[in-house]
Image (cartoon, coloured by chain):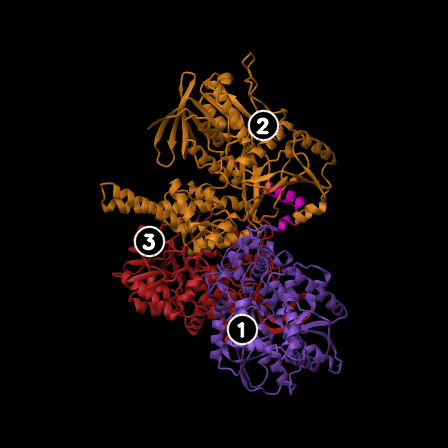
Amino acid sequence: MTIQARYDLIIVGAGLAGLFAGALAARRGARTLVIARGLGGTHIGAGTVDVWGYKRRQGCSTGGPEAGELVENPEDELTRLEPPHPLALAGASALPEALAQFQVLCEMGEYPLMGALAHNHILPTALGALRPTCLAPESFIAGELSRAGELTLARWPGFRDFYADLAVANLQAQGYAARAVTLELPRLPARRDMFASDIARWLDDAHYRAEVAQAWRDKLNGVTRLGLPACLGLERPTEAHHDLQNKLGVEIFEIPILPPSVPGMRLFNVLRLAIESAGGRMIIGPGVTGWIEDGQVLGIIAETAGGARRYAAKNVIVATGGVRHGGLESPAKGQLREAVFDFPTTAPSKFFAPLYWDTPPYTRGGVRVNENMQPLTADGEIIYANVLAIGGLLAGADRVGEGSREGIDLATAWQAVNGLSG
Amino acid sequence: MRHSTEILVIGGGATGLGVACDAALRGFKTLLVEKGDLAHGTSGRYHGLLHSGARYVVRDPRSARECYHENQILRKILPSAIEDTGGFFVALPEDPPDYVQPFVAGCATSGIPIEDLPLNIALKEESLLNPKLARVFRVPDAACDSFDAAHALMESIRAAGGEVWVRHKLVGLMKSSDRVTGAELGNVLTGERINVTADIVISCAGAWAGQVAALAGCEVRVTPGKGTMMAMNSRLVNTVVNRLKPPSDGDILVPVGTVAVMGTTEIVVDNPDQYAIGDDEIELLLEEGEKLIPRFREFRVLRAWAGVRPLFKDKPSPPGPLSRSPSTRTGEGESDNSRLLSRSHSILDHTTRDGVDGFISVVGGKFTTFRLMAEEALDVTCRKLGTERQCTTAETLIDPPGQKFHTLGKRLNEIESSGNAEVICECELVTRAQVEAALQRSGSLVLNDLRRDLRLGMGPCQAGFCAYRAAGLLHTRLTTESTETAEKSENENSANSAHSAVRDVRATNSALLEFLQERWKGLRPVMWGANLRQLELDVNIYRNLLGADRLPTLRAPEEYPTEKTA
Amino acid sequence: MDKNYALRDTELSSDVCVKCNICTSACPVAAVTDLFPGPKTVGPQAQRFRKPDTISVDKSVEYCSGCGVCSLVCPHGVQIAEMNIIAKAQIAKRDGIPFRNRVLGRSELLGQVGSWLAPLSNLPIQNKFLRGVGEALVGISRHAPFPKFARQSFRRWFQKQPPTTGVRKVVYFHGCSTNYYEPRVGQAAIKVLQLNGCEVSLAEQNCCGLPMQSNGEFGAARAKAEANLKKLAPYVRDGYVIVGTSTSCTLTFKHEYRSVLGIHSAEADLVANATCDFFEFLEMLDADGALNTNFRPVPQRIVYHAPCQFRTHAVGRPAADILRRIPGVILSETRADCCGVAGTYGLKVEKYQIAKDVGEKAFAEIRHADAARLTCDSETCRWWLEGHTGVRAVHPAEILAEAYGLTP
């Protein structure tokens, strides 16, 4: 097997953690490759950076807003964290630095994220639940529920992925002033269903936005804050948001809906731009395993169309996420296996809970690392000095129950790249 | 409220629907009541197999003949619910070779046409099958969707002037000295009580037959024989594949719609409403699956569920000339092995058996023979009522005329022809119009009923996308109804409507969570591989993106069914 | 079943689809037309309703262009584009293959006849009236750019060259486009390889079969495949590497023979594993420190477009990486996933506008790049992009040859 190419750093995985690590490394001058079997969690998330959303709670959790109390100030929760939680391992400065850097990259990509570590936005979901998050795009902010004032959500007849009346009813039931208004999307085809990404591309076009404004203008009497499904532009979202607000004379906020996540795709574009403009390379498509010889990691092996190819690297960062995109495989019930280097994983004896909405214990399983993000054996020994693991692959967190996914991705990516020399 | 009818049928599974259909066609005023949704019990959880009968030729030839005969009849009268898949019986090298000759002879005697297939032809048709098979026989098995069948039967009953009330549970049987005169029913949705008087009450309650009979003071012992099955996400075979050996666990793989169902096990349980699926049962099905398809474990197991067979073994009859009604039949062989408890059916005339008039129980049996069970039950009924009315079900179409066998591509064809638009459940190609019509028809708040009706949520994503969409449509339906009700009522104050709006949204939220929990019940036993990745995506949608678990609901979490409840 | 490549059964790869819509979000065709409902819909979702050897009920999968972006972005390894091609072949079985598609599928025959008749054969290609007739009669869009036939085929040229020796044994696969339309690409490639110490042979070869496959003629495509495998396998056994400058031909050897045509023989594996794209091969030399980097300056703004098929090779963009090292070259890269033509898709009258809409992003980027030349490893993309932007298009091998001082 020949060596296809040589890099300073290879990052496996193109979710938020891998992409951010790639951008950081490339901008520091490392010859960087980000390689992944496919696209990652950006495309199925909310497009926000969640740091810490919910106070810890035991057992069953439905029943209303009193259960799963929302966190107003994530910093409070963070100070009480201990290893093995990845945020604790990454160290106190990792998260604030990472968030600051991430916001810089978003600005570069003309897609600013707003927010600060000491404060969570509380934003409405497409079901009308309350969703706390730390950094959100500018186009989400007018939906802030702690602000007074009525929210108006748009019904889009013929679009199957948003039900304004249901969201409004839930908001009202939780004490918020909300109503729905019917706004037709011009040129919605009868022939097939549209996805969020389709509508987002239409709204990138100024002519289409003008048509939309024309169709909606007269229906917005008394509307101050208008909530739309998060489809407000893909390539030029800031322009689309500002333009439509101007044309309609109302504040507009976006609400994340079912995948594909347009806000997530925007973050992907921002990071891809950052990586490539700094000379980094991305390869999306092949499966990847570790290239190990005589107990040394020399790089990775990619399953290209023509067979296995080796890519040499001084350092490798594994950012393949947890189970959802195959970073952790589960070949049989009750088993977890790390897919690239076969790192040891921690996993509980009982994987699942009786109720659907209780966090299954297995999600806390994953790869154990030290403060430098180096994977460890069960005895705490470093496995390979030049391989790091970050993001959703790491053990010790309940990303859904805590509302902590993206904070972990960014902080561990920052910590990993920061620690690499040369 | 009061109602009266001639024949009251308890139970909306295949048996009850068949009985009500036969009764209505014989001109009786007929009412069928079912506590849940149609095919809520065993019929909705079975293997999906329309037996050719070949499975029984060696041990139970009478059953085999019955099956084949009924198989042929059902193909004529209910083709829309049946896919003509054909079947194979396959022997592995380790299967007892001395089973083959009796099998072949038995099929001949029972009149079941079979074909000894060369292995290369079988493998060409079904490329995933074990290349080391010793023998393959082609048989006239078919696959049958019991929900389609149930709905077609219900339409037939109504067309013949009968009535079907779902979500009406049996609260008690009305008696006058030693005669059952009717039943007291409870509307599950509204709580309303209804007394129905009837000339004859026919219990078709399947695994619950004992509970119903007890309400009349009769003892009927039905043993719930749990059978676990799992659906493979991909249709690994397009032909039913049976093992050519004495019937046992895990020996049939049936293509049913878009999946392939592997089954089954047989474990006696105490309570037909409470049973769990064991990891050992899943492992057994995987092992047996590997014998048929060597790569079996590579494929995604979508879901597991169990149904309870109503196994009937009659009590010893009292001595005397009236000890056995001519139409009662018992199984052959009275061993403790529950598999040998006959799958034959029995019509119990409680007058002769227990001294209670006006009451019949139809017990035992299997899906394939439901029409025959109904015919015999109605023959007994006619005798009891002193009237002679002929059964016409074998020649009467249940489907509208001109229907053909169901084909796999049917829904895809319809969607492609009508435009790929407003598809709510994308996995199973269910449209918004279909969902709205079903919500209207059923008046149900249970999304799981939509699933049974339309197959919504039964595909690979297990309601990952469509549960949210269906909840949105349900909510629209509920609020439309509430507005209509409010407009009709004179008391239109806004406090009432606000209260009703909150109740409505709690109802919708509960329906959504209940549905997700119901899906989880069947996923948990088979949570690995791609299915686990699917779970992560779905949990990401419902908990992270939508916050479905943090909304006001109607009931406390402990009241949701977990895997131990049916 | 987490390692989907081990499955080797393209249609059953639908098993692992979790319906996430990542593929739909990336599809360049679904983004521009409502005639195509998206790769998930016509791919793994519809696949569960398909039975082998039955009449196809599909319609909308016809609009899949086969660009392959969906398969690349899928995190689970569903072979979406590949199963779509197979489904389209089923439709072809049902509806028959239109004469036009048979013509477009026969690029070797077209090339042979056209090259023999050149330059006369080039007249109808440029003549508006005749193109209009062509569109009306046969269904090939009159707007679709076509290349000119060359008078002397590449093979003819090669046979006149003196033999050379070298350290590495390479057998060059020219494909129809180089042989009949652009021999200069092959000429540049041979010289570059020889300069880099390769002994280059020319095997007997025929069309890779991809145009037939794309148009649903699996039988004919398989015949071409088997013939090529028979001719090339002996070279591989002798230690040769197969190098090609047409990214679609090399992809066909690497991937389509097995994943779409279902050929699973020892020869198919042998040839697949020994095939390299031209720049992929040079990148390997570079990783070994064996690439000649004595470049002369080529002071020029050049814009590179990575063909969608080349992404499916999954080896990155070695052409861009190497061209950047030529002094004076200011290289920008398009971000568009697909230029639109997707082989023969954009040539068809009913698909032309869709293909053009797909390509708008690439066209805009190329115009905006303000480059003197555009470069792309795939011939059909080159012709299409040049035709729609007016920017002269060359194969990156030609630029490299210039940098080596190899071109006259």
Q: What is the distance, in whole Å, between disc 2 and disc 1 at their CAs?
A: 74 Å
Return the residue at label 2: B344
Q: Which residues are magenta?
A: B274-298
Q: Which chain is red?
A: A
- Shown colour of chain B: orange
Front residue of A411/B171: it is: B171
Hey, what amino acid is under mark 3? Val
**Measuring 56% from the left and 33% from the top, which residue is drawn there?**
B73
- Left or right of residue B283: residue A403: left
**Quadrant of the image for the N terminus of chain C?**
bottom right
Which chain letter goes with mark 1? C
Label 2 to label 3: alpha-carbon separation: 55 Å
Task: Answer above or below: position of B51 versus A121.
Answer: above
Q: Residues within 10 Å of mark 2 (few under 14, many from 20)?
A: many
Identity, as a three-letter code, of the amino acid under mark 1? Arg
Q: Which mark is residue A168?
A: 3
Comparing labels 3 and 1, the label whose residue is closer to the camera: 1
